[in-house]
Amino acid sequence: MKGITCPLCHGPMREVMGKNGAFLSCAEFPACKGTVDLGPDGRPAPACPGDPAHGRMRFFATGKRGPWFGCKKYPDCRETLEAGDTD
Ligand SMILES: [Zn+2]
Ligand SMILES: [Zn+2]
């Protein structure tokens, strides 16, 4: 995907299918395990609104109120976003 680089090695990424739908995996996998989750609209998950240094959030396809994003630093960071809110 254009413009999105691996959060670990900053190399190119490729789209793969996972349990929660498509996500981006580092082109160097398995040597590099960098991933970026994609939201329901197919766009990359947003950065953590609490601290951008936490990186892009993790996508969860199901929740009480529908799909949502949660910070990868949980439980240290409890920021969440509803997946419908990210335009
Ligand atoms: Zn990588
Ligand atoms: Zn965070």
Image (cartoon, rainbow, N blue to C red):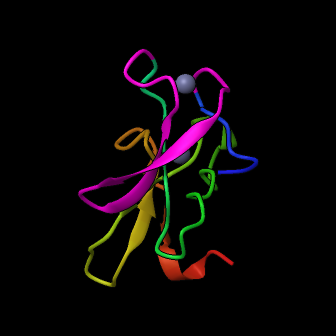
In the rendered view, does 85 fall on the left or right side of 15?
right
Near-viewer residue (31 or 65): 31
In this figure, what is the number of numbered marks?
A: 0
Residue shown at 57%/47% (left/top)? 56
Residue shown at 61%/58% (left/top)? 46
Q: Up-down: is 44 above or below 75?
A: below
Q: Which residues are magenta?
A: 8-31
Q: Up-down: is 42 above or below 72?
A: below
In the rendered image, residue 68, in percent from the top left (x then y), is placed at 41, 70
Extreme residue in the right direction = 3
The quadrant of the rendered image in which ligand 1 is seen is top right
Residue shown at 25%/81% (left/top)? 64
Split into 4 quadrants, where in the image is the C terminus?
bottom right
In the rendered image, residue 44, in percent from the top left (x then y), is placed at 59, 58
In the rendered image, residue 12, in percent from the top left (x then y), is placed at 64, 34
- Quarter residue 11 falls in: top right
Near-viewer residue (18 or 87): 18
In the rendered view, does 4 fall on the left or right side of 35?
right
Q: Judge whether residue 25 is colored magenta.
A: yes
Residue shown at 53%/43% (left/top)? 14
In the rendered image, residue 54, in percent from the top left (x then y), is placed at 57, 38
Q: Up-down: is 15 above or below 9?
A: below
- Quarter residue 62 falls in: bottom left
Extreme residue in the top direction = 31
Q: Judge whether residue 3 is colored magenta.
A: no
